[in-house]
Amino acid sequence: MSQSREPVSPNAKNRSRRRFLKQAGATAAAATVVAGSVPHVHAAEDNTIRLALIGCGGRGTGAAANAMSAGRGPVKLVAMADVFENRLVPSHRSLQGSFADRMDVPEERRFVGFEAYRQAIDCLRPGDIAILTTPPAFRWPHFSYAVEKGVNVFMEKPVTVDGPTTGRMIELSKKADEKNLKVGVGLMWRHCGARKELDQRIKDGELGDLIMMRAYRLHGPIGFFTAPPKPADMSHLMYQVQRFHAFLWASGGCYSDFYVHNVDEICWMKGAWPVKAHATGGRHYRGDSLDQNFDTYSVEYTFDDGSKFFLDGRCILGCHDEFTSNLHGTKGIGAIQSMGGGPGICRIYQGQNPVRDHELWRSPAVTNPYVQEWIDLIDAIRQDQKYNEAERGAIASLVTSMGRMAAHTGQVITYDQIANCEHEFAPNVDRLTPDGPAPLAPDAAGKYPVPQPGKVRDREY
């Protein structure tokens, strides 16, 4: 696999605001197909789109459920894969209990191991969909095989965790285009009707010129944020894959996995990608956890026009919780209150004081974006519309990594620096074996390296 790291500067001609907004509009247009129209693309004689689930954790199980709930013609789950059987079994049980008529996954099509993704994808036909919901480190080899086999893809965010894999994913996205494959990325807020209306109102000038943006994701530890001491009977590799949020090579850590939504949402509505990031962060209450995360992050992103986007993230119990994004314009504020990743509520306020008396607009109820993103993808497949979110997802992931690297190194990191940084966290991820070495090795005390701002300045650990 080529390790091309083509710089993807936000100032390049093909990253212009016009092209960026045109791409966003094209994605939105994919959702305008009339429900119930006769499909004319999928080659199968029964028009059933078959699904293979690769990564059977909570989000993977949820994605498969969302796909089978979209209601855009017949779909069927036919294969499942994971490196942990104890994740695959309950996932299958749950989906079978809720979608029995859309499940066809006998024991011989339930695969376990690092090569299981190939076996699952091999169960598909051209035009079917591979659901890639493993930890992000595995995204590029899994996407590569799906493109090779000519199947459509839905992949969860983030899609990359460092510069080298971002360049690789962008090249794979181009290959997917050459094969007319449809690719969805789990940045579902792009498909949220409330946010799309807010974005259009911003473009129509209701906020005036955007001058400053803020986003907050503040809550206690979730997922595998922490990593208690490794069980004696588990290898370092399997331990790190199991607790992937705790390790930068596997997920980009909590920063990339949790905050990419806020970053992508703000950049979408700004209509640009930031050119640099400056950040602080720290580890506070670690106990015996072996993770690489900071408990708090505070990042200042700067756009080419000088405007700022401030992102605050915190994973500490007992503190104020908040999950919001705010866009300040010369006329008023666009506010987004997120609710567990669902539709949320969008508002526009006159002036800079977001109180009820100043509220000018509030979004109506909309379809859950977790389902809407599947409606849009399946419509694009059945109507043979151009649909590929992979490059945009890779850039959103890279911009997120830019802020993370700024915090972990204590340096101002530019877009071009993160795009061309040679530190690939897991260069052999496509060749891992259960009993082989892990990408991250412990020291003599059994502890893993953590970021050291100011001491380690050209890489994150």
Image: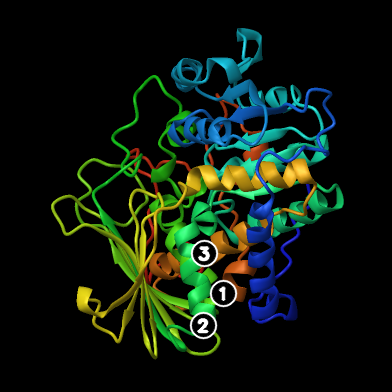
Determine whether label 1 and label 2 are within 8 Å by CB: yes
> In the image, residue 291 lies at what x, y percent?
35, 45
**Mark identifier at residue 273:** 1
Label 3 is placed on what type of residue? Answer: Lys
- The residue shown at (66%, 75%) is 9
Q: Nearer the viewer, mark 1 or mark 3?
A: 3
First of labels 1, 3 by sequence position: 3
Determine whether label 3 and label 2 are within 8 Å by CB: no
Q: Label 1 to label 2, Cα distance in Å?
A: 7 Å
Is 415 placed left or right of 313 in the picture? right
Label 1 is placed on what type of residue? Answer: Trp
Can I make out residue 140 in this image?
no
Residue indicated by mark 2: 303
Look at the picture and state if 76 lies above or below 185: above
Specify the farthest residue to the top: 107
Q: Label 1 to label 3, Cα distance in Å?
A: 18 Å
Colour basis: rainbow
Q: Quadrant of the C terminus?
A: bottom left
Residue indicated by mark 3: 196
Is 148 placed left or right of 299 in the picture? right
